[in-house]
Amino acid sequence: MNLLASRPSLHMDGQDGLLFEGVPLQTIASAVGTPCWVTGAGTLRRRTRNLRKAFTERGIDISLHYALKANDHLATLTVLHQEGCGADVVSGGELRRALAAGISPSQIVFSGVGKTDAELMLALQEDIGQINVESVEELRRLSHLARASSLTARVALRVNPHIDAETHDKISTGRLGDKFGIDWADVPALYREASTLPGIDIRGLATHIGSQILSPAPFKAAYARIAEMVVGLREEGLSVSVVDCGGGLGVRYRDELAPPPAALAGAIAETLGHLDLKLAIEPGRWIAAPAGVLLASVIDLKAQREGISDFVIVDAAMNDLARPSLYGAWHGIIPLAPDLAYAETAPQTVVGPVCESSDVLAKDRLLPAVRTGDQIAILDTGAYGAVMSSTYNSRPLAAQVMIENGQWQVVRKRQRVEALWGDDSIPEWLDSE
Ligand code: LLP
């Protein structure tokens, strides 16, 4: 099974079925019920260390600001904090979560278009490490807020370098016409302005060109543009001490040739390594995606006419894992039972119970003949999985479990169905009996 060959955290055991970090997933699925997300702390740690090592080997001292949006569970954040990661946050909520996980404010970077005054004030009051400013207007607003409260913001300007990351359209962020960052041609003038604005301590530049990037070339092109800008600004006598290189390193979901971290480290070393900068990256997916699986059970089977894949209807759906319906994303699926591991396969389409035809988790997938009640694992769902869930169709948020060193624990209870309407209220005029 080549899905297992490239995933060192997963093994098929002849007795216990599919193991994740050595724990039989059938045990978890049966005890906790499905759908259920499982995060492997060992995998999070191993990947973080491998990522860091790639940079150390290139002689680059890198700060890892884990992008919370990929998986913001407090247990995940605690593991990554223990591994020495700071945080990249994109909302007041994420900022509060990072602080709740014990991440020091100085290790937090706040990116994102559309930061409100309240969010900028929170960042100022918490004295976080860096705010990546995304527009002229935001810079001036931040200066005003900082001055009015006698605080100072450490700032980097987020550059839109007009580089196509050659990834899915919906997760590209660095092209002309994308809403993110400041047009690179406008950056020098704004940097000059920033260096004169009260309450602003301008430190450097940031960029993030997209996600699930599978080639080093766009990284290199973007960082070369940033490097040129650093040199130009310094020639004007301006101080540039930090460059935040963003996230975006892709992973193998199917059979993609995902670049190793050494390729990203190489791109950064070649373009920015000689400029005596404090360098940072904001990885999310690369660390978290392979560290999670989503467990589901087969509810029903529906045969189709000749030539059309039979349907396997499971209890996880697009409200749990949005990626397939949103981006046409491909996630590996492996039944948990050992007897199915080597059974003959046939094309089947795995769908959830949500009332939309887009609720397809896997189309025309070669799978063994599963039976009602069988359990499956949907792979590589540790990033942009649980965080993107909704309660559409009044489906409660699924339970979450963390594994480490053979132990496992529920880290988020399945949402109670009553909680779905717990905050609803009925207008008085409807309530008067
Ligand atoms: N930094 C910034 C400013 C970002 O916007 C992002 C992701 C990252 C870092 C982390 O990127 P990563 O290393 O995870 O590629 N929901 C989509 C992905 C959206 C990514 C948004 N920004 C998906 O499921 O593919």
Image (tube, helix red, strand yellow):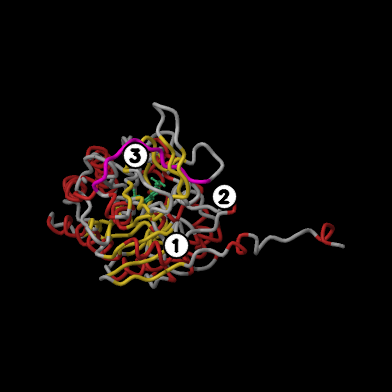
Q: Which residue is mark 3?
A: 161
For the question of whether residue 221 can be seen, the reply is yes
Amino acid type, residue under disc 3 in the picture: Pro
Q: Nearer the viewer, mark 2 or mark 1?
A: 1
Between 259 and 309, the one nearer to me in the picture? 309
Q: Along the polypeptide, which appears first: circle 1 or circle 3?
A: 1
Q: Secondary structure at mark 3?
A: loop
Residue 306 % position (x, y): 40, 27
Residue 62 % position (x, y): 23, 59
Q: Residue at x 38, y 43 (%)?
A: 187
Viewport quadrant of the C terminus: bottom right
Q: Is residue 149 above or below residue 273?
A: below
For the question of whether residue 240 can be seen, the reply is no
C-alpha separation, residue under disc 2 versus residue under disc 1? 20 Å
Q: Are marks 1 and 3 in contact (CB under 8 Å)?
A: no
Residue 405 % position (x, y): 25, 71
Q: Secondary structure at mark 1?
A: loop
Q: Is residue 401 above or below residue 317?
A: below
C-alpha separation, residue under disc 1 versus residue under disc 3? 46 Å
Q: Tell whether 362 sits left or right of 320.
A: left
Between 198 and 357, the one nearer to me in the picture? 357
Q: Residue at x 26, y 38 (%)?
A: 218
How many neighbours does mark 1 have within 10 angstroms: few (below 14), some (14-19), or many (20 or more)? some
Q: Along the polypeptide, which appears first: circle 3 or circle 2?
A: 3
Q: Which residue is mark 2?
A: 392
Question: Which mark is drawn over residue 433?
Answer: none
How many neighbours does mark 2 have within 10 angstroms: few (below 14), some (14-19), or many (20 or more)? some
Amino acid type, residue under disc 1 in the picture: Gly
Q: Which residue is mark 1?
A: 33
